[in-house]
Amino acid sequence: GQLPNDSKSIMRIELRTRRCSLSEASRSRFDESIRKHLQQLVTASKTRSVACYWPFNGEPDILLLCQQLMSNCHLLALPVVAHNTDNLLTFHAWHENSTLVKNRYGICEPAQSALVPVTSFDLLLMPLVGYDMSGNRIGMGAGYYDRHLEQLRDSTAPLRVGIAYSLQEIDPIEKNKWDIPLHGVVNERGWFTFTG
């Protein structure tokens, strides 16, 4: 059956625990596979610009690939969380010489770099806590991405791709009207696009 929203917070805790309990060896093997599949997606989709994320709290580590893309002249950006309590998220350019600072969650963000409008990316990589095979995503719970992407709800660009381990796949979840669905997901087994 479908999950009511209050059980989403219980599920978040469970999924985080599951993700954090991966052994070091499995994690680095999975991360390597995820980077490889992600590289294939970038190549196949002829992506030039990527909205990335800085791995946090056991999220798959894509940094090596980001650095490779950077040195191959791709345009990269990282999310920056507003300092106030509006839960607003914007993307800022990320270069090899960018100064990174930690935000209130302890996640690295580019300091003083140019704002990049989300509409200009080919590919938007989204960290998540859980996902189902219909493209529904359970995030951290603050709604940062959903709010930022509202304008793009019906748009196919940028391609919205969740980055996760297969252990984060869950049974179909109930969608909220503000949830912005994913177009696909990359996990250690490959990349998958969702239909409808």
Image (cartoon, grey):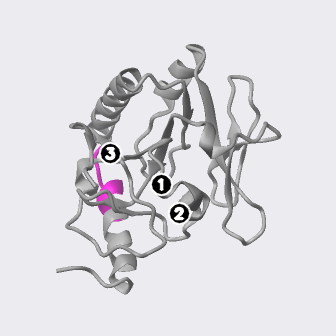
Comparing labels 1 and 3, the label whose residue is closer to the camera: 3
Residue, far left = 1
Magenta stretch bounds: 17-23
Give coordinates of residue 40: x percent, y percent. 33, 24
Q: Amino acid at mark 1?
A: Asn
- Tell me the tag on residue 185: 3
Q: Earlier in the sequence, mark 1 or mark 3?
A: 1
Q: Amino acid at mark 2?
A: Asp
Q: Which residue corresponds to the image point at 23% horizontal and 56% vertical from the top-left?
A: 133
Element marked by disc 3? strand
List the residue tagged with mark 1.
57
Element marked by disc 2? helix
Magenta segment includes 22: yes
Q: Earlier in the sequence, mark 3 or mark 2?
A: 2
Q: Work out how far the residue at label 1 is from the one at label 2, CA to CA, in angstroms.
A: 20 Å
Q: Work out how far the residue at label 1 is from the one at label 3, CA to CA, in angstroms.
A: 19 Å
- Tell me the tag on residue 146: 2
Side (left or right) of 162 relative to 54: left
Q: Work out how far the residue at label 3 is from the one at label 2, CA to CA, in angstroms.
A: 16 Å
